[in-house]
Image (tube, grey):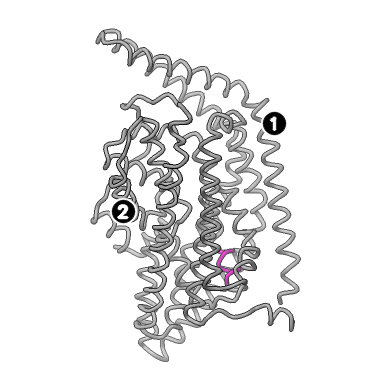
């Protein structure tokens, strides 16, 4: 079995890498030709808006300020038109990635439900679910706190907001991001579903997990009749995984389209302007990878290297599509091949997609404090720790929200009276940062699954099986 599947895996990885490189190259070509004039006009408009903002800050004459504000609104309309035109030009490439992601999202909800019901039912009783759930949440909280703390320490060390000397946006500017504040009601609504059908339609993973746990425990409790449901769900899960295999054939096209669209729009200029922030953030992600790998090594041992090697396809998918969700089915498959029992994988991995987004966590503190630094705000250490704790709570269960990290950051900025317009500094480079965040989320959840498997004595040594095969 292992021997027959290896060549396919290698070829798909190779095709994804080739598509990634082709997408970057073709994107730069489009940036310099097809959308060059649009980008040039947008840069000129941004400079004009910056000059108007500077004039508004310097003058105290109300009539002049009103005149400048009207002028800025007219220019903003022109800017939005240009953005829409540029988006239409690269839309054929964006569609390749969008269709792939839609197909993946089509798979995720039924896959989580079927595998989790089977996994929980096989655990046998509520005590086993509680024991494994407790260990899982303990690891998640530790990993989340470590990610947030590392982001806080590094942004204080590097001070990218001060070093970049970026012009500050108008405090009244609309970033287009709907904020979410610290609310127990909002959090609980993200946890408990009113309708499992609605939860599946919106891919609310945490709500699907809650329903699946109840369903799985009830299935185990009814005895022989429950075994029929377990067998049906098991067969259903295998069918969904087969569908996943078909969808994965489109992965290289999706990667090519996603990279072409991003590079065509952003171009090399955005990398140069924000090189300090991007470089320091990716260095922070590198340190987090080392910490997560070391933590996994402490529990799992030398096999953690084999796990990371197995995850190269999920990493590439998550990175190039900016979606850890896109890598979910493949990650589940690779974890089972690594030796994690299906009952542990189907329980821990879905839960991780709501509670253990380590890449997103480190970005939240890094970005929030970066914006504060850009405004020259000196936040005391106690305030920063308060921000860290707020982010620990507000980030849970929001994975299904579009641009979830920015949504949470917007709410956090409002909580600590930091101008939300500072998010405008990050909107342009967020797609580039989201790539690294998504790949890191895959690593964090995979290490968590392997660790819990080891704690439960449910981690098989597949290297022995492969050698015999």
Identity of the residue drawn at 51% across and 55% down: 288
Disc on res. 298: none
Badge 2 local density, few (<14 within 10 Å), some, or many (20+)?
some
Badge 1 local density, few (<14 within 10 Å), some, or many (20+)?
some
Residue 349 vs residue 8, the one in the foreground: 349
**Does residue 460 show up magenta in the picture?**
no
Identity of the residue drawn at 71% across and 42% down: 22
Total marks placed: 2
Residue 444 vs residue 378, the one in the foreground: 378
Identity of the residue drawn at 31% across and 26% down: 172
Residue 185 horizontal/vertical position (percent): 23, 56
Quote the CA–CA distance across marks 2 and 1.
45 Å
**Does residue 330 show up magenta in the picture?**
yes
The quadrant of the rendering that contains the N terminus is: bottom right
What kind of element bears circle 1?
Answer: helix
Q: Is residue 399 shown above or below 417?
A: below
Residue 428 horizontal/vertical position (percent): 49, 34
Q: Is residue 61 shown above or below 24?
A: above
Query: Chief secondary structure of the magenta span?
Result: helix
| Image quadrant where residue 333 sits | bottom right
Q: Earlier in the sequence, mark 2 or mark 1?
A: 1
What kind of element bears circle 2?
Answer: helix
The quadrant of the rendering that contains the C terminus is: bottom right
Closest to the camera, between mark 2 and mark 1, is 2
Residue 110 vs residue 178, the one in the foreground: 178
According to the image, label 1 marks what residue? Answer: 29
| Image quadrant where residue 423 sits | top left
Relative horizontal placement of residue 257, taking residue 178 as reference (left or right): right
Q: Is residue 147 shown above or below 434?
A: below
Residue 15 horizontal/vertical position (percent): 72, 53
According to the image, label 2 marks what residue? Answer: 389
Q: Which residues are magenta?
A: 329-335
């Amino acid at each position: 079995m292992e021997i027959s599947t290896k060549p396919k895996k290698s070829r798909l990885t190779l095709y994804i890498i080739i598509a990634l490189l082709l997408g970057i190259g073709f994107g730069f070509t489009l940036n310099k030709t097809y959308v060059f004039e649009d980008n040039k006009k947008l840069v000129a408009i941004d400079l004009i808006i910056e000059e108007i903002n500077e004039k508004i800050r310097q003058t105290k004459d109300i009539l002049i300020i009103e005149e400048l504000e009207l002028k800025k609104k007219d220019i903003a309309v022109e800017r939005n038109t240009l953005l829409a035109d540029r988006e239409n030009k690269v839309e054929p490439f964006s569609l390749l990635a969008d269709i792939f992601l839609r197909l993946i999202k089509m798979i995720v909800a039924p896959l989580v439900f079927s595998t989790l019901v089977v996994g929980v039912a096989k655990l046998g009783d509520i005590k086993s679910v509680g024991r494994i759930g407790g260990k899982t949440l303990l690891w998640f909280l530790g990993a989340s706190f470590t990610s947030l703390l590392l982001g806080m320490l590094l942004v204080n060390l590097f001070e990218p907001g001060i070093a970049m000397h970026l012009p500050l946006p108008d405090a009244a500017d609309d970033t287009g991001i709907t904020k979410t504040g610290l609310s127990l009601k909002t959090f609980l609504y993200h946890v408990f579903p009113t309708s499992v059908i609605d939860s599946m339609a919106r891919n609310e993973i945490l709500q699907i997990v809650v329903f699946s746990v109840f369903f799985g425990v009830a299935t185990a409790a009814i005895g022989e009749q429950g075994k029929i449901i377990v067998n049906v769900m098991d067969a259903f899960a295998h069918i969904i995984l087969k569908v996943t295999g078909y969808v994965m054939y489109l992965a290289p096209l999706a990667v090519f389209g996603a990279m072409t669209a991003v590079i065509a729009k952003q171009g090399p200029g955005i990398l140069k302007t924000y090189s300090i922030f991007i470089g320091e953030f990716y260095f922070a992600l590198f340190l987090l990878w080392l910490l997560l790998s070391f933590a996994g090594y402490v529990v799992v041992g030398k096999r953690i290297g084999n796990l990371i090697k197995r995850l190269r396809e999920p990493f590439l998918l998550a990175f190039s599509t900016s979606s850890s969700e896109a890598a979910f089915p493949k990650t589940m498959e690779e974890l089972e091949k690594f030796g994690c029992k299906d009952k542990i994988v189907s329980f821990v991995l879905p839960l991780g997609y709501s509670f253990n987004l380590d890449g997103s966590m480190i970005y939240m503190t890094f970005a929030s404090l970066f914006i504060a630094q850009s405004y020259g705000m000196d936040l005391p250490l106690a305030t920063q720790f308060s921000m860290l704790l707020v982010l620990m709570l507000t980030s849970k269960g929001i994975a299904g929200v579009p641009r979830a990290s920015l949504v949470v950051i917007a709410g956090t900025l409002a909580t600590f009276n930091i101008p939300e317009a500072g998010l405008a500094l990050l909107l342009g480079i967020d797609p580039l940062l989201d790539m690294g965040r998504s790949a890191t989320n895959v690593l964090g959840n995979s290490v968590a699954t392997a660790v819990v498997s080891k704690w439960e004595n449910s981690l098989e040594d597949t290297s022995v099986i492969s050698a015999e095969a």
